[in-house]
Image: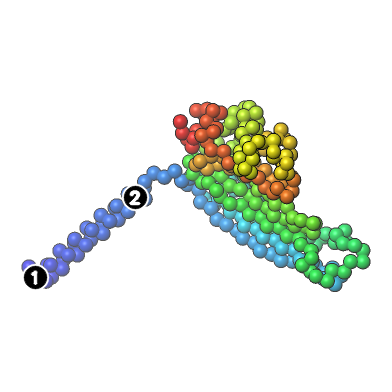
Amino acid sequence: MNFSASKKICYFILTVSVFFSLVSISCTKKTKSDENEVTFDTIRVDKVESVDYKKSKLKCNLHITFTYPIACKKTSRLSDLQTMFVEKVFSSQYADFSPQDAVKNFSENYINVFKSTRFDDFFDEDSLLEDETGFIYEQSLENEILYNKNGFISFVVKNTAYEGGAHGSNSINGYVIDLNSGKFLTEDDFAGNNYQKNLSSLLVQKIATAKGLDNASQLETIGYNAIEDIVPNGNFTIDDKGITYYFNEYEIAAYFVGITEVFIPYEELKAYITNDNPVIALVGR
């Protein structure tokens, strides 16, 4: 066999090998996944504005990290999905705006409110602010996708705000979108019509256990309200393992307690989840 023929045979073998490698890779990529066919993009804003006040400049800081859907399997539903995200992150006031315009308008409104603030209301009449760090006007707003599988998108909206008071405020609000129905998941979807009765004692016990208490009634000694006031509040997210509730500052406890998170595994919710329930596929039987 001459060198030219040998070279052609080697090239053929190499070509066939590459072909089968590509076929193998292609087949691997087509393996069925439980991931939703929804993709996201993020808009970030960092703005600083200041106004003159006596001998100081009072600053306003605005931070936004907005993650929103840019593509989904049912393209006709994309606009509705974006509206749902805009409403929950920026409020229904911005529902008619595109994600980009919602961020722009929210930012402008926030800065305008700061500039129109009567700062004399925050200080004594003869007060001269020599230290411009003594006044904080700031908002940090972001949402985070926690779960994007099995027909559900679960996300939280985190908001930290300071407006010149003694301390700021922090909140977390959770949402779950059922892509099959195009609606937000509600408590009666996974815990039945009597969800308040079904879940209240479970939530109380979970909080007490997390705090290392032997008796749930002891919660009242560490800053929590009366245990009968601790009830499902519609503020939750889901994942493969269970449901997480969020109780914000002052909601069920004193400010110093902060935000309370309560995780309930699906195993403890099985008694309330029927076979026609949207989350049945996550629970298993």
Numbered mark located on residue 25 in the image:
none
Q: Quadrant of the N terminus?
A: bottom left
Is residue 93 shown to the viewer in this render? no
Distance Cα–Cα, label 2 vs label 1: 40 Å
Residue 204 position within the rendered picture, expressed as x and y whole percent measured from the top left: 65, 36
Q: Is residue 55 above or below residue 140?
A: below
Dot 2: within a 10 Å radius of its alpha carbon, few (fewer than 14), some, or many (20 or more) residues? few
Q: Amino acid at mark 2?
A: Thr
Numbered mark located on residue 28 in the image:
2
Residue drawn at x 71%, y 63% as measured from the top left: 61
Earlier residue among tags 2 and 1? 1
Looking at this view, name the residue that lies furthest to the left. Answer: 1
Residue drawn at x 68%, y 57% as measured from the top left: 140
Dot 1: within a 10 Å radius of its alpha carbon, few (fewer than 14), some, or many (20 or more) residues? few
Residue marked by disc 1: 2
**Relative depth, front residue between 62 and 260:** 260
Dot 2: element = helix
Residue drawn at x 59%, y 37% as measured from the top left: 185
Residue 210 position within the rendered picture, expressed as x and y whole percent measured from the top left: 61, 43
- Left or right of 268 on screen, residue 157: right
Residue drawn at x 65%, y 28% as measured from the top left: 197
Looking at this view, name the residue that lies furthest to the front. Answer: 214
Mark 2 or 1, closer to the camera: 2
Q: Is residue 112 above or below residue 236?
A: below
Q: Amino acid at mark 1?
A: Asn
Residue 109 position within the rendered picture, expressed as x and y whole percent measured from the top left: 74, 57
